[in-house]
Structure formats: C-alpha cells, structure tokens
Image (tube, rainbow, N blue to C red):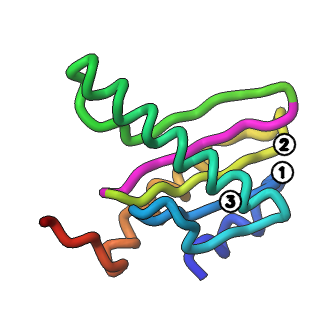
Amino acid sequence: MRLAPLRAMPGVVASALVGPDGLPIELIGDAGDALAAELTSLRVVLDRVGRRLGAGNVTRVAFTSERVEVVAVTSGDFVLGVAMTRGHDTRAAQQLLARLALDITDLPRPEVA
C-alpha cells in the first residue's frame, strides 16, 4: 500500500490516492472516500484556474477548515492527499506526499488519443 506511511502520522483523519479517471486507487480512514471525491473535484477547479491565469499546472494545494487541514499534491494525472486534525503540523505530511508522488511512476497512465 502506497499510502501506508501516512497511517503512522499523528492526526491523520483520511488519505487518498486518486487516479486520472477520478476513481480512488487507495484510501485510508473512514473519510477516505469523501476525501477522494473532493480531491477529484478540486483538481478540476485548480486545473481550470491554472489555465485561465496562465499559471501552468497546480502541483500542491493546502487549506485549513474549522476541523481539518488538507494537503494535496499532484503527480501527472494522479492526486495524493491527506486530511489531518486541525492543529497538527502538516510539514511532515507534505514532505511524505511529495516523496510518494515521485514513487507512483509505475502506475498505468491514460492513453493519449
């Protein structure tokens, strides 16, 4: 399991690895399905923002809500994300997600038509 190292991090509520088709490849936590769905939706919006602003691809996003902090990174067409209880330091999770993103090069990529 690619996301297994995130299980040991304090404060992790959910984690997800989402494929190019928007379907989850791997989930951690009871909220993993919800996180995967929202990461897919967020990816669509961020891609549009990047295009409209001429900023290029968005490769990392982080936000804080009342209860959780969410960090997500992209690797090609894949998105990896983690939701942590608010107040936990997300730096280690950000670094781990970046390393995991580099390690998913062996996953099948969509064919270009």
Q: Badge 1 is on which residue?
A: 11
Q: Please identify, in this view, whether the residue under mark 2 or under mark 3 is nearer the observer.
A: 3
Q: Write the start and end of the magenta stretch as one range.
A: 67-76
Residue positioned 41% across, 51% down in the render: 74
Foreground residue, 77 or 22?
Answer: 22
Q: Mark 2 points at which residue?
A: 85
Vertical order, 77 against 63 (above or below): below
Q: Position of residue 51 (x, y in %)?
A: 25, 27
Q: Which amino acid does label 1 sit on?
A: Gly
Q: Which mark is residue 50?
A: none
Horizontal and vertical percent for residue 91?
61, 42
The CA span between labels 1 and 2 is 5 Å
Q: Does dot 1 land on a helix, a strand or a loop?
A: loop
Badge 2 local density, few (<14 within 10 Å), some, or many (20+)?
some
Which residue position holds label 3?
15
Please tell me which of labels 1 and 2 falls first in the chain. 1
User: For residue 56, what is the image quadrant?
Assistant: top left
Answer whether labels 1 and 2 touch (C-beta < 8 Å): yes
Question: Label 2 vs label 3: CA separation?
Answer: 12 Å
In the rendered structure, which amino acid carries the disc numbered 3?
Ser
